[in-house]
Image: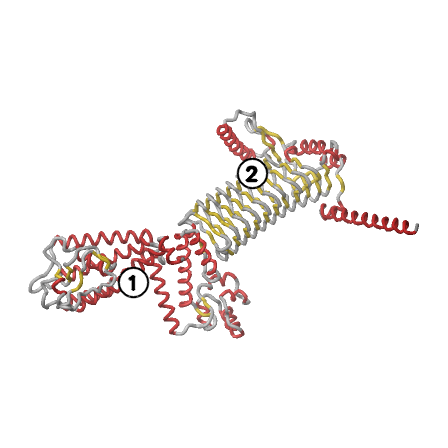
Amino acid sequence: MVCVCQVANGLGRGVIRLLLVWGLMGLLWLGVGLPAEAADLTPLTLDVLQQRVQNPVRRDGKPTVDLRQFVIDLRSEDAGDFAEQFYRLLQVKLQSGSTPLGLDLSYGVIQGDLDLQRLGLRAPLYGPSVGDLLAPAAQEQLQRDRRRVSQLSQLSRSLLIQPETGPLKIFLFRGPLKLVQTRITGRVNGSEIFFLGRLDAQGVNFGSDSTWAEARFSQAASFMGARFQAVRFRNSIFFDRARFNQAQFGGEANFQGVEFQGATNFNQASFVQTGNFSRSQWQGSADFAQASWQQQAIFLKSRFQSELFLTGNRFEAPLLMRQAQFNQPVNLRGAAILDQADFGDARFSAGAYLNVAGLEFNADQAEILGSPGQLGAILSVPVLAGNETLLRNLVRNFRRLEQIGDANEVEYTTEKLRLRSMEQRLLGVNLNVASLPELQQVGLSASQAQTVISRRQDRPFVTVADLLGLTGVDLATYIKVRDRVVTGEPLSVLNRVQLAGRWLGLQMLLVLSRYGTRFGLALGVGLVAIALFSLMFWAIDRCRRRRPTLIWATQRETLLMVVSASGLMAVGIGAIVRTADAPGLTLACVGLLTLPIPGVLLIQLYRQGRYHDLLDESYFVEDGGLRQLRLLIARLPNIPKFPFFRDRYTPLPWDRRWNWLNYYDFSLNNWLKFGFNDIRLRDQHLPGLITSMVWYQWGLGLMYIALLLWTLSRTIPGLNLLIYF
């Protein structure tokens, strides 16, 4: 008997514990499910609703039906006909009269579905307007929207071969609507509504799906801090500013075909499921700074007329920008691409580019796709420091995708930034050793310069950004002086000379071949140089003394030589102009390499005159043993000393009409190590100035052929595979 009682008592205590647990869980559910003010909320009754409808209050200077801080039960199974009375009373009051009346449902809970269409004024898409209910500006805007929807509807019916289904309708919501911190447990239907007033839904919590398809927002719409489940804004239009700051999209966010005519802000928004912005249009700036995407971010065929800010975004799934159009820069500074970014067939206007400074991107885990030869040219990085790893990863990414042109463009950008860094290192003022006048000369005030000197006595500057930590140095001053100052150990004379040599070599690679990325540019440089040297060699050989007997080429040969050299230079200059970033700088570099030293030698040669043996024969001789195309990479420009070779090499025939072509052949031999005949300098009675000029061209030719082959290896995919893999 005692055992039975003990068992019964144990069972009773277990039931009590279970009831207590259930009670606590219920309280917790209520606390989570309702807003913080839930303890102060009261259910909205029909009497209170009628009273509030009949006695509007003023909110922000406009008459408004005040239904704040109520629990509104619109569930038909619980409220009977209350939902019908709710929609009927509000619809009549909101859409009647000449003065727009607002509706405030803030800080409350709406249980069940909220159908905003039933609160709007139903108006036909065609036919007359709604008369005196709308202001002139609103009427004009509505007429434009009607024409737009009408054209789209007619086009849709014509393509689908659908019969006329009767007159289309839209819904007008005249006054402002407030849903600040409101929790809605059911579905929300805001589709096909023209909101003529402001929509303020800051912090709204949609417990279920919401639909705003085909909606029009005449004034600013704010969903800041809103919590969405699945939401559809398909084909909606925001005529004014749209704010989705810190919004959370728990389900699929469908913004297909949406038109944002004002500035739009998705700052710090969170997309748990797919964010679909396909075919969207953005007239104002689009700010997605610090947004996170756990699933696909889709912007297929979207058009951005202004800036797109993706600063600090985190893309854990593919970012799809295929066939998008960008008219202004796209900012990806500090973003993280963990999967794939696809810019295939995207179009960038002349002023548009991708700012990828500080981008987190690993070529082994993610990839960036784009139209071959386009994407690499529009990637922008302002400085090399802090972005070297990113640039190397971008090069690896494009080489792995066999987009050699894009990889070369990224490398060209890298070397341009490196050149700028060298220039700053050579010419910049070192913050750790500069005197007070030098610091003032770069743009610092006397007090700021003194602060710099005091700071470096305690600890040296490591980076230029350390200036921002000084008292009195603001951001404007930092931006003004950051490109003029450097940090680190001062350069010794030897280190400065070495750095200057590296700078000069890199500068020549950039201007003569765009760091091996433009074969046409390198070829154009070679054509100009060949034409100049051929003309000089012809002048040396065919224009000798004046007295006592003039030695001069015929008028026909002179004309042919001048015209052909001019034509060849024109072709080369045209190639340089088409392919070089700075054609003037490239031509100046070619001129400095080909004109000063040969020009000095030529002037000295004509100044001292030529009176020696064999003056009536050419200085150049050709090998008459073979006539064929030859690769002469190992050939020197003068004939061997063994006397037997003098019988094989005969002087150029001046009496032939085609003799002028031999000078181009000799210049090709010296410059490209390639030619039809083996033409060299003779070894007897030859002025040393002519020998110096020929050897000078031969030395330049060795460097040029190395540059040309290097450029070919970087621009032809097959040769790239041999070098890099």
Q: Which residue is drawn at 72% across and 43% down?
A: 69
Question: Is residue 363 rendered to the left or right of residue 91?
Answer: left
Give the labeled residue for mark 2: 234
Residue 120 at x, y percent in the picture: 63, 33
Q: How far apart are marks 2 and 1 (CA)?
A: 61 Å
Question: Is residue 486 rendered to the left or right of residue 167?
Answer: left
Residue 230 at x, y percent in the picture: 61, 41
Q: Is mark 1 on a helix, strand or loop?
A: helix
Q: Which of marks 2 and 1 is nearer the N terminus?
A: 2
**For this rendering, which residue is in front, 681 or 568?**
681
Among the 4 quarters of the image, the one containing residue 89: top right
Q: Residue at x 71, y 43 (%)?
A: 108
**For this rendering, which residue is in front, 17 or 135?**
17
Quadrant where the image shows the C terminus: bottom left
- Dot 1: within a 10 Å radius of its alpha carbon, few (fewer than 14), some, or many (20 or more) residues? few
**Mark 2 or mark 1: which is in front?**
1
- Dot 2: within a 10 Å radius of its alpha carbon, few (fewer than 14), some, or many (20 or more) residues? many
Q: Does the rendering let one see residue 200? A: no
Give the labeled residue for mark 1: 703
Residue 380 at x, y percent in the picture: 45, 54
Q: What residue type is labelled 2?
A: Arg
Residue 238 at x, y percent in the picture: 55, 40
Q: What residue type is labelled 1?
A: Met
Query: In the displayed image of the protein, which residue is found farthest to the left?
Result: 548
Q: How is the rendered protein coloured?
A: secondary structure
Q: What element carries label 2?
A: loop
Q: Are marks 2 and 1 in contact (CB under 8 Å)?
A: no
**For this rendering, which residue is in front, 636 or 160?**
636
